[in-house]
Amino acid sequence: MLASLKKEWAEFNPRGKDIVAYSVQVGRIGEDAPREPVGDNVLTFAWI
């Protein structure tokens, strides 16, 4: 089981910025537009 998990994780690029499944986007009151979305790949590897 651990070997299969390692194989699946190896497919992800830790420096990739592509959105795979979801993203987070923030904005502030008074700004014209929200900031660029942060993809799930970036959030995952930042947390790990």
Image: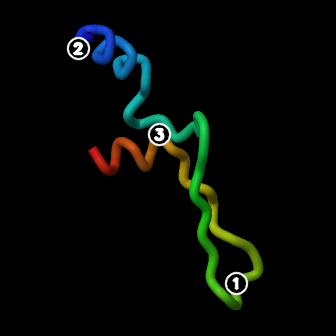
Q: Residues within 10 Å of mark 3 (few under 14, many from 20)?
A: many
Looking at marks 2 and 3 on the same chain, the residue that comes earlier in the sequence is marked by 2
Q: Residues within 10 Å of mark 1 (few under 14, many from 20)?
A: few
Label 3 sits on a secondary structure element that is: helix
What residue would you read off at disc 2?
Answer: 2
Nearer to the camera, 9 or 1: 1
Examine the rendered structure and indicate whether residue 28 appears above or below residue 41. Answer: below
Mark 3 residue type:
Asn
Is 42 positioned to the left or the right of 3 in the image?
right
Tag 2 and tag 3, C-beta contact below 8 Å: no
Q: Quadrant of residue 14?
A: top left
Q: Residue at x 42, y 28 (%)?
A: 13
What residue would you read off at disc 1?
Answer: 31
Measured Cα–Cα span from mark 1 to mark 3 = 26 Å
Is 14 positioned to the left or the right of 22 in the image?
left
Measured Cα–Cα span from mark 1 to mark 2 = 46 Å
Select label 1 or label 2 by which is in front. Answer: 2
Q: Residue furthest bottom?
A: 30
Looking at marks 1 and 2 on the same chain, the residue that comes earlier in the sequence is marked by 2
Query: Which quadrant is home to the N terminus?
Result: top left
Q: How many marks?
A: 3
Q: Residue furthest front?
A: 1
Label 1 sits on a secondary structure element that is: loop
Select label 2 or label 3 by which is in front. Answer: 2
**Residue 27 percent location from the top left of the image:** 63, 75
Q: Residue at x 47, y 40 (%)?
A: 41
Examine the rendered structure and indicate whether residue 41 appears above or below residue 32. Answer: above
Is 45 positioned to the left or the right of 1 in the image?
right
Looking at marks 1 and 3 on the same chain, the residue that comes earlier in the sequence is marked by 1
What residue would you read off at disc 3?
Answer: 41
Query: Which quadrant is home to the C terminus?
Result: top left
Q: Residue at x 39, y 43 (%)?
A: 44
